Image (cartoon, helix red, strand yellow):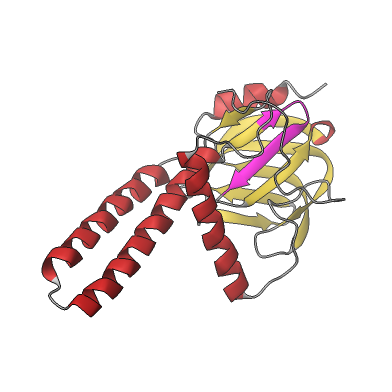
Amino acid sequence: MRIGAGRRRPEGRGAAAAAVTGRPRGRSGPVRRAVEFHSSLWRCSAQWLLGRRPGAGPQDRGFPHRGPVFAMVLAMLGVSVVEVVLVELIVPWPPVRAVLLVLGLWGAGLVLGTLAAMVVRPHLIGPEGVRVRNGPDWEAFLPRDAVADVRAVRRARDRDGVDHDGDVLRVVVGTTTTVEVVLSRPLAVRLPRGDEVDVTRVALFADDPRGFVAAARGLIP
């Protein structure tokens, strides 16, 4: 699908790195990371409600990477809503009920933000290159001239999330990757925790790997 309209709004590009995450930053403590992560979830919820697609230019195509996780998170949201209702109906003590309701609504909001991030932050392929995304705030930019080959390769992985194995960056959803991007030169990528690694291949998950491959190969001279 083609998304976005008007002038591109850069979403957290690093000033000098060839490929960076959604926000250029060094290592930070667990409390700061948690605050930033939760803030990003709420921001994604607002963008979803407003129909916005952050960082997308008029010529960019979006490729969702929800996989089986979307249905699981949607079920979690349903459970969270039921819990809030049950607390209101069952807990007789107003102070306790108020605390539990606040906690329940906060939890439901975070689950909603997780769903929203999957919707408003697909991978993007455009004239400048490929933006690989994960979660509410992480992305890596692969410049057009660094993309040497793209192929659909389905592989099972140990766990979800962003990590690396040597010079291979892995962006995993549902313990699976479905696309492999081969780079023409090493690129520096900042991982979610702040570490920078040089990678020559990127394994990622896309719901439509064939469509992703066809679009990305259009970047190769």
Q: Is residue 185 above or below residue 2?
A: below
Which x, y percent locates residue 53?
58, 36
Name the quarter where the C terminus is drawn: top right
Which x, y percent locates residue 98?
26, 72
Q: Is residue 88 visible?
A: yes
Segment colored magenta = 125-134
Which x, y percent locates residue 29?
64, 75
Which x, y percent locates residue 49?
45, 40
Residue 52: image quadrant is: top right
Residue at 62% in and 71% down: 32
Looking at the image, residue 101 sits to the left or right of residue 91; the answer is right
The residue nearer to you, when weighing 96 against 182, is: 96
Name the quarter where the N terminus is drawn: top right
Residue at 24% in and 61% down: 84
Say whether residue 144 is magenta: no
Dominant SS type (magenta):
strand
Q: Is residue 133 above or below residue 39?
A: above
Looking at the image, residue 60 sits to the left or right of residue 111; the answer is right
Q: Is residue 109 above or below residue 28?
A: above
The residue nearer to you, when weighing 34 against 70, is: 34
Q: Is residue 66 visible?
A: no
Residue at 71% in and 38% down: 9
Looking at the image, residue 141 sits to the left or right of residue 18; the answer is left
